[in-house]
Image: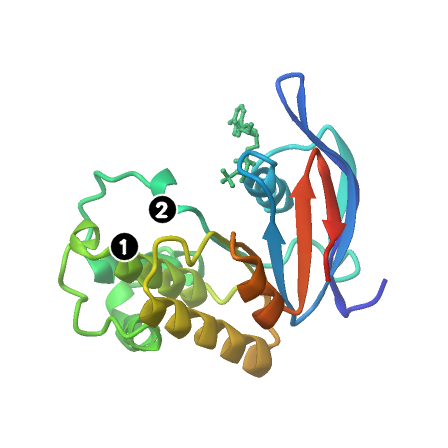
Amino acid sequence: MNRKTAIRVEDLTVAYDSRLILEKVSLEVTAGQIVGFIGPNGAGKTTLFRALLGLIKPIAGRVTFFGDAGRPNLGYVPQQDRLDPLYPLTVWEVVAMGLYRDLGPWERLSRHKSKVLDALKTVRLEREYRRKFWELSHGQRQRALLARALLSRPEILFLDEPFSGLDMESTTLISQQLTRLKSEQNLTILLIHHDLPFLRGWADRVFWVDNGRVSPLT
Ligand SMILES: Nc1ncnc2c1ncn2[C@@H]1O[C@H](COP(=O)(O)OP(=O)(O)OP(=O)(O)O)[C@@H](O)[C@H]1O
């Protein structure tokens, strides 16, 4: 494996209680690629992402990043329905959370205003920043969550159904931004999406998740 392999998964097995969800999954993701995951509801796509992110402990197997260089900075945009709807934060505050990892203990967020503003501009939300996050449309919220993830400068970005419920305009905006980040910053992007023709046309590779297995479609 060389630096060009962003993620290497070997014989990954994940279970909830005693129920096997993923069984001996092996795959590789090349750095700087957009990789789609598709499969039936409940097949284990989110579980795969959570295991790769280190949020669930697998019962067996190994995940290595960039030739075993330790855990890189991983960005994650979960499905919106898994967020806490009571969050009373503004759009600005939600996006600025992407900076927390970089801030020193006494450093003030206000020093980084321009970074937050740039991130908001990337997803065309610069005029919405004072609004409450939960007052935004679904598509605008998705864009804010992407801006938050990008602000943390991930080396690998995981997106769980980033286009679900989005209109054409937001889908096009987000997919164009992701393609740009891939080309300009060699960002590795993994996403779950249910539209196979779209994935075939846009992603570099597509994996099918079903029956505990993950197999390449393209
Ligand atoms: N925390 C949990 N505890 C127990 N079972 C779980 C947990 N999370 C998910 N599951 C179960 O594991 C299976 C895989 O769920 P997962 O969310 O990974 O599927 P998915 O492919 O992402 O589905 P969808 O396309 O519907 O989002 C499902 O049967 C689900 O009910």
Say which amino acid is labelled 2.
Answer: Gln
**Residue 22 position by quadrant:** top right
> Is 111 in front, or is 133?
133
Residue 65, percent from left and from top? 72, 56
In the rendered structure, find residue 76 and report the number of the disc placed on it: none
In three-dimensional space, the C-alpha distance between marks 1 and 2, rounded to whole angstroms, equals: 8 Å
> Is 218 in front, or is 75?
218
Instruction: Identify whether 132 is placed above or below 2.
Output: above
Horizontal side of residue 103 vs 138, given as left or right: right
> Is 44 in front, or is 9?
44
* Mark 2 CB within 8 Å of ligand 1: no
Instruction: Identify whether 57 is placed above or below 178.
Output: above
Circles 1, 2 touching at the beta carbon (< 8 Å): yes
Residue beneath the point at 37% across and 55% down: 105
Residue beneath the point at 49% across and 67% down: 153
Q: Which residue is mark 1?
A: 138
Q: Secondary structure at mark 2?
A: helix
Colour scheme in the image? rainbow
Q: Residue furthest top?
A: 18
Q: Which residue is mark 2?
A: 80
Q: Which comes before the other along the chain, label 1 or label 2?
A: 2
Q: Secondary structure at mark 1?
A: helix
Q: Residue furthest bottom?
A: 184
Q: Is residue 57 visible?
A: yes
